[in-house]
Image (cartoon, rainbow, N blue to C red):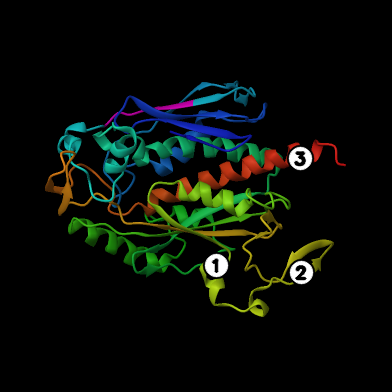
Amino acid sequence: MSSSFGQIFRISTWGESHGAGVGVVIDGCPSRIPVSAEDIQRELDRRRPGQSEIVTPRDEADAVEILSGVLDGLTLGTPIALSVRNKDQRSTAYDEMQHTYRPSHADFCYDAKYGIRAWAGGGRASARETIGRVAAGAVAKAVVRALYPEVDVVAWVSKVHEVEAHADVYAVCREAVEGNMVRTADPDAVGPMVAAIKEARAQGDSLGGAVSCVVRNCPVGLGDPVFDKLEATLAHAMMSIPACRGFEVGSGFAAAGMRGTEHNDAFFMDGGKVRTRTNFSGGIQGGISNGEPIVMRMAFKPTATLMVEQETVNDQGEDVTLRGKGRHDACVLPRAVPIVEAMAWVTLCDHLLRQRVADVMPRG
C-alpha cells in the first residue's frame, strides 16, 4: 500500500482512525526553515472535528507533537515526524460493520485486495488520515514562503448541493472564508448552505458540493511538460483526498463548449513582465506555471455514512441491511478546505524544490 506523495518534498502518512494515533513523516525538507508546533496546530485546528454545529461532534483536540527533524524552531534537513494521538474513538459504534460492508465505503474493496481491514472507523480510508496531510502542508507552506514570500493559497466552499457561492476568485481572502462555519467566500450563500446541511442531517442524509482554490503569485516555470505537468500533479494530490470525485483547472470542463478564439489567453507586456489578458488556462500552460493565478475546483461526493437503512451485503455473501451509527459529517466541505490548501502547498513545494535542482544542473 502506497502512503507517500511527492518526489523531493516527500510525505508519508501513517495510522488508522481508531488506532493509537495518526501522523506523517516528511522527507526532503530543506534545513533552517522556521517551523513550530503552533504553526502546524493552527492548520490542524481548522480541520479538526467538533469546531461548529454543522460538522461531526467527535471531540478531538488533534494536538500535534514534533518527534524529529526540528530543533529550536528550525528544520534540520532530516526527516520530520509529526504525530497526533487519537483520543475520542468509539469503536463499538462500528461493531456491526466488522462483517458488513457499508455502501460506497472502502470496506469491500479493502477486504478483496488485502484480505483484512481495520473495520473500526474505516482505518486508512478514514478522513483522519488527512491529519498528516494538513500537518505536512503547514511545513510545505513554511518552505515555500521562505523562498517566495508572496505565494499564497486560499480555498473556499463554492457549492453545497444545489447552493452555489458567487465570489471573485482573484479577490477571495482567507479572513472572509474563515469568518463563517461553512468556509464559503460568499456571505449571501452562508445561510442557505447551513440550512441545507442541517436539513440533510436531520433526515439522516448527506450532501456533496465543491471546493475552489486559488494560488496567487506562483513563480513561473513550475511543472514538467509531459507526465509531471503541474496540473496533473495537482489533480493527483486533490483526487487522493477522501470523497474527492472531480478536478478541473482554469476553464475546466467549460472549455469543451468554447471556440479557440474565445479560449486562447492573449499575451501582453506589463511593466517588463509577460502576462495574459484572460486566464482560461488557469495559470498553467503546457504543464508549466505561467505566473498567473492558478485556479482549481474540486467536486466532493456526499458523505457515505447515512443514518437511514440501506441495502448491502456482509463478508459471508449474504444480503443484509445496515443503518449508520456514530458521529459523522453530513457534509465534508467545510473541513475539506484546509485539506485542499495543504495538498496545494505540498505539491507546490515539491515542484519548487524540483525546479531548484533543475536550475543548478549543467545545461548542454
Residue range corresponding to the magenta coloring: 82-88
Looking at the image, is mark 2 or mark 3 earlier in the sequence?
2
Pointers 2 and 3 in contact (C-beta within 8 Å): no
Residue name at image x 63 percent, y 29 percent: 28
Marking on residue 168: 1
* Amino acid type indicated by mark 2: Phe
- Quarter placement of the N terminus: top left
Outermost residue toward the right in this view: 364
Give the residue pinned by disc 2: 267
Q: Residue 234: give x, y in percent of width and height.
A: 56, 50
Q: Residue at x 53, y 33 (%)?
A: 11
Could you tell me residue 137's position as x and y percent?
A: 53, 39
Q: Is residue 83 above or below residue 216?
A: above
Name above or below for residue 230 compared with residue 82. Answer: below
Q: What crowding class fits label 3: few (fewer than 14 Cα within 10 Å), some (14-19), or many (20 or more)?
A: few
Q: Secondary structure at mark 1?
A: loop
Give the quadrant of the C terminus. top right
Query: Which amino acid type is marked by label 1?
Result: Asp
Please tell me which residue lies in front, 273 or 208: 208
Of the two numbered discs 3 and 1 in the rendering, the one whose residue sits closer to the viewer: 3
